[in-house]
Image (cartoon, rainbow, N blue to C red):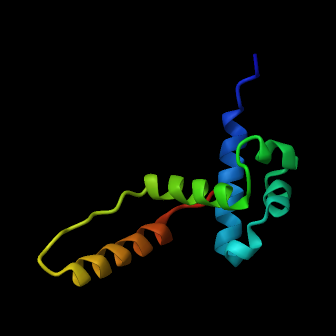
Amino acid sequence: MSRPRDPAIDRVVREAVLDLLAEGGYARATIDAVAARASIKRPAIYRRFPNRTAMVTAAVKDAFASAPLEVVETDDARRDLVRTLKSAIAQLTKIQIPA
């Protein structure tokens, strides 16, 4: 029987990913950089995610989940999409990334 994962590690990984994305985009959010920022070893990340893409995707998905979008549908699909994307950008810029 395996030991349960520590939710504190999940949290510091997510925070490190979001910090690094904010500082330098996807190129900056490497497994090594996240491990260093979170003060954990790389295997702790690889136990949770098979690769960097999965790690970043999970962090961004969690960030969106904490800031749900308001979607309004009208008869103008283009305007609806633009409005939704602007809402997403606004929500992401409001997300508080812990220091």
Residue 13 placement (x, y as % from top left): 71, 51
Quadrant occupied by the C terminus: bottom right
Total number of numbered discs in the rendering: 0
* Horizontal side, residue 45 vs residue 18: left or right: right
Residue 56 position within the rendered picture, expressed as x and y whole percent measured from the top left: 64, 60
Image position of 31 (left or right of 25): right
Using the image as rendered, state which of residue 34 and residue 50 is in the foreground. Answer: 50
The part of the image, by quadrant, that contains residue 57 is bottom right
Q: In the figure, 22 relative to 64: above or below? A: below
Residue 6 location (% of width, % of height): 71, 32
Quick one: quadrant of the N terminus? top right
Query: Is residue 46 at all visible to an observer of this figure?
Result: yes
The residue lying at 35 percent from left, 72 percent from top is 87
Residue that sits furthest to the front in the current view: 50
Front in this rendered view, residue 99 or 65: 65
Q: Nearer the viewer, residue 42 or 98?
A: 42
Q: Residue at x 82, y 63 (%)?
A: 33
| x, y percent for residue 37 | 81, 58
Q: Is residue 40 visible?
A: no
Residue farthest along the left direction in this orientation: 75
Q: Is residue 99 above or below residue 83?
A: above
- Residue at 81% x, 42% y: name it: 44
In the picture, residue 26 is in which quadrant? bottom right
